[in-house]
Image (cartoon, rainbow, N blue to C red):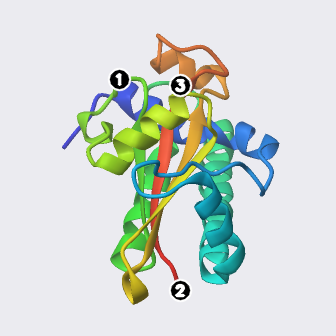
Amino acid sequence: MILHKRTWLGLACFGAAAAALLATVSTGVARGVDAGTESNAKAEVEAETDPALERTREQVQMLDGLYKNAVVSITTRYVAGQDEQPAIMVAQDIFGAMRKEGWHSAKLVDATGEPLDDANAPRTDFEKDAAREINSGKPYFDRVVGEGNDRRLLAATVVPVVMQKCADCHTHKKVGEILGFIRYDIPIK
């Protein structure tokens, strides 16, 4: 599918935006909890007694920093105008390569209700819940799904507008406002 060049730059800003916020979010951020299946206290005990889950959450933080900083750096260095492809396309390529190799799945998801590309709209129950949590001010939200060897961590990390290049395409947003999140789906090992 070919998207308008403005859409490509908008997607770059969508992914790039969270890098600035990432620097302000410590590794011990409060985690969202699926209220339908577990309480906050149970989630805290689970994290303390499940080293595999904690390692997977740390992996999300590492990947998040890598992806967001790469997109911001590429946008800052190489994207001069709206007629150029945005750096988010590099992140999308990396997301695809990681998924193809079986490492994990990552996806940009809109939280504004006005995605530049319909493919970025929240689709799953987790993505819809994450959009609600991110819009309520949480920089991070996660949920454990599956059982035994099939457990996976679904995580969402906020993507705000961090530079004017983002707001040039997302004209309804200002620097500092939320665009969406990156949704991660990572096996717990």
Q: Quadrant of residue 76?
A: top right
At 77% from the left and 45% from the top, the residue drawn is 25
What is the three-letter code of the residue carrying label 3? Answer: Gly
Q: Are marks 1 and 3 in contact (CB under 8 Å)?
A: no
Q: Earlier in the sequence, mark 3 or mark 2?
A: 3
Looking at the rendered image, the disc whose residue lies closer to the viewer, 1 or 3, is 1
At 37% from the left and 83% from the top, the residue drawn is 150
Q: Does residue 90 show up?
A: no
* Residue under pointer 2: 189
* Residue under pointer 3: 81
Q: Nearer the viewer, residue 146 or 17?
A: 146
Separation of residues labelled 1 and 3 (CA atoms):
25 Å
The secondary structure type at the circle numbered 2 is loop
Q: Return the mark for residue 27.
A: none
Give the vertical position of 4 relative to 147 (above or below).
above
What is the three-letter code of the residue carrying label 1? Answer: Gly
Expressed as whole percent of the image width and height from the top left, the position of residue 152 reads 43, 73
* Residue under pointer 1: 113
Q: Nearer the viewer, residue 163 or 41?
A: 41
Give the vertical position of 114 relative to 15 (above or below).
above
At 37% from the left and 71% from the top, the residue drawn is 99
Which residue ends up furthest to the left in the rendered image? 1
